[in-house]
Amino acid sequence: MQVFLQQIINGLGLGSIYALIAVGYTLVYGVLRLINFAHGDVFMVGAFLGLFAGVSLHQSLWVSLLFSMAGCALLGILIERLAYRPLRKAPRMAALITAIGVSLLLENGGQLPEVFGPNPQSYTNPKTDLPLFIPEHVYRVGGVSIDLPTICIWIATAIIFVGLRILVTKTKIGKAMRAVQHDQESAALMGIDVNGIILFTFGLGSALAAVAGVLFASEYGQIDPLMGLMPGLKAFIAAVLGGIGSVPGAIIGGLLLGVVETLVAQFQGGATYRDGIAFLILILVLLWKPTGLLGTGAVEKV
Amino acid sequence: MTLITRSSLFDAERAPFMRGAAAAAICALALALGGCKGNTETAGPQSPTGSGSVIQIGEYGSLTGATATFGTSTDRGIELAIQKANSAGGALGKQLKVDVKDDASVTEQARTDVEALVNQRVAAVLGEVASSRSLQGAPVCQAAKIPMITPSSTNPRVTEVGNYIFRVCFIDPFQGKAIGSIGTDILHAKTAAMLYDNSQDYSKGLAKYIEQSFTSKGGKIVGRYTYSSSDSDYRSQLTSIKAEHPDVIFIPGYYNDVGIIARQARQLGINVPLVGGDGWDSPELTRIAGQSGGKNALDGCYFTDHFSPDEKSPIVQGFVNDYKAKYGARPDAMAALGYDAAGILVDSIKRAKSIEGPALRQAIADTKNYQGVTGNITIGPDRNAVKAIVVIKIVNGKFTFNSRIQP
C-alpha cells in the first residue's frame, strides 16, 4: 500500500510538470487552433533563463522566476509575430510545419556554444554546489517521501489553475479570450483587438512554460538544450488527453499521464515502455474520443 | 485557395517523356551512389597519408553532450601523450598530428565521424569511450583496414568486430566479476537489485556479467529494472526496488544518470550502498549526486575502474603531475587510458617501422608488457588487454583507492 501511495505521489509530481506545460499548449490551441510544437522548447529556454538569473545575476527564486517568465513571454510573442502570424490565412499544415521548424531552431540554436552549449548544466549554486533555488528537503509522511521541489510544483500548479480560472471567467481580457476562441471574425466585429489577444495568450502560455522549466530544473537538477523534447511531447499528449482547448483538461490530462507513466515503469522491464505508453494513449484518444476527456465537441450552427 | 492535385509535370499519361526522364535520372543517381559506396568497400588496405613530415592520427569522442567528460578527459590524455612523443622526436622521424572529431555523445554521429577520418586516410583511429559508439566506428575501420584502438570500451563485442580493432582496457566479463565480488566480498550482500541502462550496450552487457558473478557466489537478484539514457525520473523504478529491500543496488550505468539516480534514491529513503563500474568515473559524478542527509548521496558506494590517481607508483605520479601542470586538474581513468592508448599506438608505429595498415596492426597485436599508467599492458590474442582492475570507494564525495583485483 505504501509502495502504491509512493508511486502515486511520484506520478503526480511528474504529472504536474506535464500539466503546467500542457496548459500553455491548450491556451494557444484555443485561440489559434494551432499546436505550438515549439512550446516544449520555450520551457527549456525558461529553465536556462532561470539559471542565468540565479547564477549570473545572483537573484533569488522569485526574481529569477519573474525574469524567466518575462523572457519567455517575450520569446513566445516574438515567435507568434514572426513565425505564425504571416501564416494566419495559410493552410493549417503550413503553420504546423513552421511550429516544428521553430522547435528545431530553438533546440539546435540552444546547443551552439555561443548560446547555451550542448553539455548538461547543473542547477546549483557554483560556489556551494547546493541546489540553486529550492533546498532538497525531504518530508517523510507515514513511510512516503515527498521532496520540497515537488511540493512547490504542486502549489504552483494549484495557484496557476485558480488564477487562470479567475482570469478567464471574471476579467474583461478573459472574456475577450473566450470570444476569440469562439469565433475570431465575430470577435473582431465586436471591437476586440484579436491580434492583441493572441499575443497576450502566447505570452501567458509561454510564461507558464517558464515556471514549469524553472521548477522542473529545481527538481531534477540538470538542464540541457534538448530537455524540452520529451516533456513537450508528453505535455502535448496530456493536453489532447484532457481535451485540447480546455485548461482543466490540460491539468487533469497531465496528472493522469504522469501517474500512468509511473505505474507502468514500476514493473521490471516496464520502464522500456514508459514513453511508448504515452504515445499509445495519444493514438487511443484520437481514435476513440478525439475531443479528450473534458473537451466538448463544438456544434457549428449554420 | 487552390489545391494542386494533378500537375502535368508528373502526369505520366500526358507526358510520357517525363516518366522516362524521371526513371533515367533515378537510375543514374542510384548508380552514382552505388558506385561511390562500392569504392570505399573494395578499396582494400588504404594507404595512409604520411604526407611530408606528419603522421595523421584520427580520434573520435564525446567532447560535448550527455557524457562530455568521457570525451574531454580522453582527449586530454591523448593530447598529453602525443605532445610528449613529439617533443621526443615523434615517430619514424615525423611529428604526429591528431585530428579530433566530436560525436556529441550521439551514437549515430560516431559512425559519421569515423567515416570522415577514414576518408582522410589516417594511419590509425583512437576512440571511443562508450561501447555503443565504438561499435559504430569499428566496422568502418575494419572495412578500411585502418587499426582502431579504443581506450575504454569494455563491451567484449567491440574487438570481436575484426582483427583491426584493439583495446587497452579490460573487458566487461572481468569487470562484471569484480563488481559482483564487491557485493559479496566487501559488502557481504545476500540480495541485490539491478538497475541498468537499456539503451547502452555497455550497461546491458555489464549487468549480465554482474548478475552471473553475483549469483554464482550465492547472491540473489531480487529485481531487474531498466532506464533509458533520455530519462530524468527514476523514482518509479527506485520505489519498486525499495519495496524489495535489497542489501545493495548494482547500477552499471554512466555518470550523468547514476548521479541523478543516487540523489533520487536517497530522497526516497533508500540507504543501501550502490555499486557500479567504470562508467561512473567522472569529476561530475558526485556533484550531480549532491548532498543528502549531511553527506554526499554516493558516500559509501563503490565502483570498479581502470586507474586511481592516488596510486603511489613513480609512473602514475609522474603522469598525474604532468597532467595537473598542463590542465590544472587531476586525471581520471579516461584520461589515463587515452594516454596509454596513444602511447601504445606511438610505440607500435616505432616497432612496425611503418604506418601501413597490416604492419601497424601486427605491431599493435604484438604489444607485450607495455608499462602504462593504467598498469602493465599486454594485448592478448583476442586483442583485449589483460590487466588488473581497481576498486574505488567514494568517501566524503571523493574517489579513494580501495583495492586492486588481479585477473
Image (spheres, coloured by chain):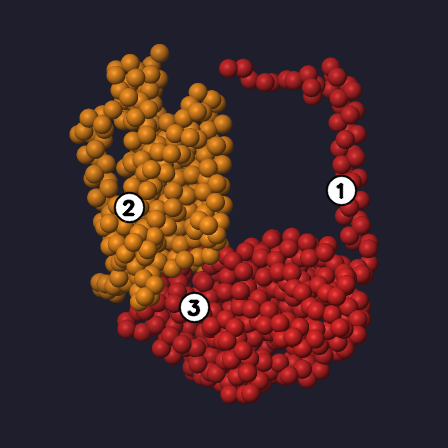
Chain colours: A orange, B red
- Residue appearing at x 77%, y 71% in the figure: B360
In the image, are marks 1 and 2 on the same chain?
Answer: no
Q: Is residue A222 left or right of residue A172?
A: right
Calculate the distance from the C-alpha at mark 1 to the C-alpha at mark 3. Answer: 45 Å
Secondary structure state at the residue bearing disc 2:
helix
At which x and y percent is residue B30?
A: 76, 38
Tag shown at residue A67: 2
Direction from residue B370 to residue B236 in the image, left or right: left
Q: Is residue A256 above or below residue B63?
A: above
Q: Residues within 10 Å of mark 2 (few under 14, many from 20)?
A: many
Q: Chain of mark 3?
A: B
Q: Residues within 10 Å of mark 3 (few under 14, many from 20)?
A: many
Chain letter of disc 2 in the image: A
Where does the image place residue B176, in percent across and percent down from the top left? Answer: 55, 74
Q: Nearer the viewer, residue A134 or B96?
A: B96
Quadrant where the C terminus of chain B is found in the figure = bottom right
Badge 3 element = helix
* Residue A271 makes an appearance in the image: no
State the image coordinates of residue B273 (x, y, percent, origin top left).
Answer: 39, 75
In the image, is A221 to the left or to the right of B302?
left
Q: Is residue B185 visible?
A: yes
Measured as percent of width and height from the top left, residue B74 is found at 56, 68
Any mark on residue B33, and which? Answer: 1
Which chain contains the residue that carries disc 1? Answer: B
**Which callout, 2 or 3, points to the residue nearer the camera?**
2
Q: Characterize the local packing of mark 1: few (<14), some (14-19) or many (20 or more) Cα atoms within 10 angstroms.
A: few
Looking at the image, the residue that sits furthest to the top is: A302
Dots 1, 2 in contact, CB < 8 A: no
The quadrant in which residue A69 appears is top left
Residue marked by disc 3: B285
- Of labels 1 and 3, earlier in sequence is 1
Q: Is residue B299 above or below residue B315?
A: above
